[in-house]
Amino acid sequence: MNASESPFEIKALNDEMGHVYEVFCETNDERQRDLDKKQASDPLVEEKMRRLNGEIDRLEQKMQTIANAQKRSTRGAPTETFASSDNEEALQHKAAFRRFLKTGQDDGLLSLQTKAMLATSGADGGFLVPSRLHEEIVKAIDANTPFRSLSRIITISNDSVDVVVDDTLTAAAWAAETAARPETNTSTIQKINIPVHELYAHPKITQRLLDDAAFDVESWIAEKIAENMGLLEQTAFISGTGTGQPRGILTYTAGTGSGQIEQLKTGVAGAFAATNPGDILVRLMLSLETRYMDNAVWLMNRSLLSDIRTFKDTTGQYLWQPALNGKTSTTLLGYPVVLIEQMPNRAANSLSVAFGDIRSTYTIADRSDMAVMRDPYTAKPNVMFYAVKRVGGAVVNTRSIKLLAFAV
């Protein structure tokens, strides 16, 4: 899609969304009147609601696709500037790496990657991806992984990084000009270690396609690696155990102490309250400290959002609002909704909604190198590539996020 066409396409999608949303509201009001009168809704109305929810989902997905394309386009500009400054060794390394991907010939590749200021080899063998291609892969993962794009990302060359965290505001107190100044409470400083873990992908392709001179093997491998790794990364950032993978936001114990994330409960196992179900969302939003509100977002999956779209406040206004007026993000109580399909479905004791400033909450550590091995034997007549990157992640600020538990 041409970037110059994006505003026109977004405007058309906004208009279509506005129409669908109007019908959605009218249909939901009809459904609610049936429930109030008969304690049951018309099956035909329920089916219409299901179709309208699906149509809203479709429009949201198209707008998100445009937003991702714009993000990739914007982030691509620095790469072109950097590419023009490549030294001769880096260009030779890039050409040798392309030849290795296509033919398996690695003559001189090891010495070239050393001259290009890369390590001698990957930790488990293989050849290191040129800096340019590695940058493109990371950007592709970033653009297609919503949680990653919200988080703080640091690039390291070691196997772990220590993040220093101050759990409290800076200690201070008022005092008269000549009054004594007793010692204030000291800040609680802790160090959180984020180790990186190995993540691999196994894309495969036919040798015939590799032999095609017009085939851009680097773009293909970047797309496949980003596609395979992005899904696994996001799953770990949400629910990873921290053992052999990043630790997810949903794995921390409930509470308000150090290292704990506060959880509010709906009061019903696996469901919202029967009356005023949106009240708990308002409480969750207001439980976040003011200093984190400017960058706060909602995290949930598409299935749960379908339920929340019908919620109203005490004045009869819907809590959820569609993307209109040139915007690509929908809102809930005025804050953007980011759909993360790895967030759990609503169930007893599930943590299916998060609200907070994710950049303040979560830090991702990316190793600065990525290795690729070529295997023409295991999957004949296909060629299999074994790509390895290392990434870690953990919550570094538990005060800047709140979770909703569907529990009593």
Image: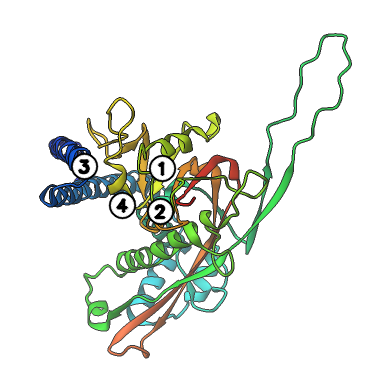
296 relative to 289 in the view: left or right: left
223 relative to 242 in the view: left or right: left
Please, is residue 356 above or below residue 103 in the view? above
Instruction: Depth check: give the residue in front, 61 or 389.
Output: 61
Mark 2 to mark 3: distance in Å? Answer: 44 Å
User: Mark 3 sits on what residue?
Assistant: 35
The disc, 2 or 1, on the residue closer to the chain's N-terminal end is 2
Q: Nearer the viewer, mark 3 or mark 4?
A: 3
Mark 2 to mark 1: distance in Å? Answer: 18 Å
Which amino acid does the dot numbered 3 rest on? Leu
Q: Label 2 crowding class (10 Å Cα cut-off): few <14, some 14-19, many 20+?
A: many
Mark 3 to mark 4: distance in Å? Answer: 24 Å
Q: Quadrant of residue 394?
A: bottom right
Mark 3 to mark 1: distance in Å? Answer: 29 Å
Residues at marks 4 and 1 touching, judged by CB atoms closer than 8 Å: no
Q: Secondary structure at mark 3?
A: helix
The disc, 2 or 3, on the residue closer to the chain's N-terminal end is 3
Q: Secondary structure at mark 1?
A: strand
Q: Quadrant of residue 343?
A: bottom left
The disc, 2 or 4, on the residue closer to the chain's N-terminal end is 2
Q: Position of residue 255 (x, y in %)?
A: 62, 47
Please, is residue 394 above or below residue 279 in the view? below
User: Mark 1 sits on what residue?
Assistant: 298
Q: Position of residue 154 (x, y in %)?
A: 55, 51
Which amino acid does the dot numbered 4 rest on? Arg
Residues at marks 3 and 1 touching, judged by CB atoms closer than 8 Å: no
User: Mark 4 sits on what residue?
Assistant: 302
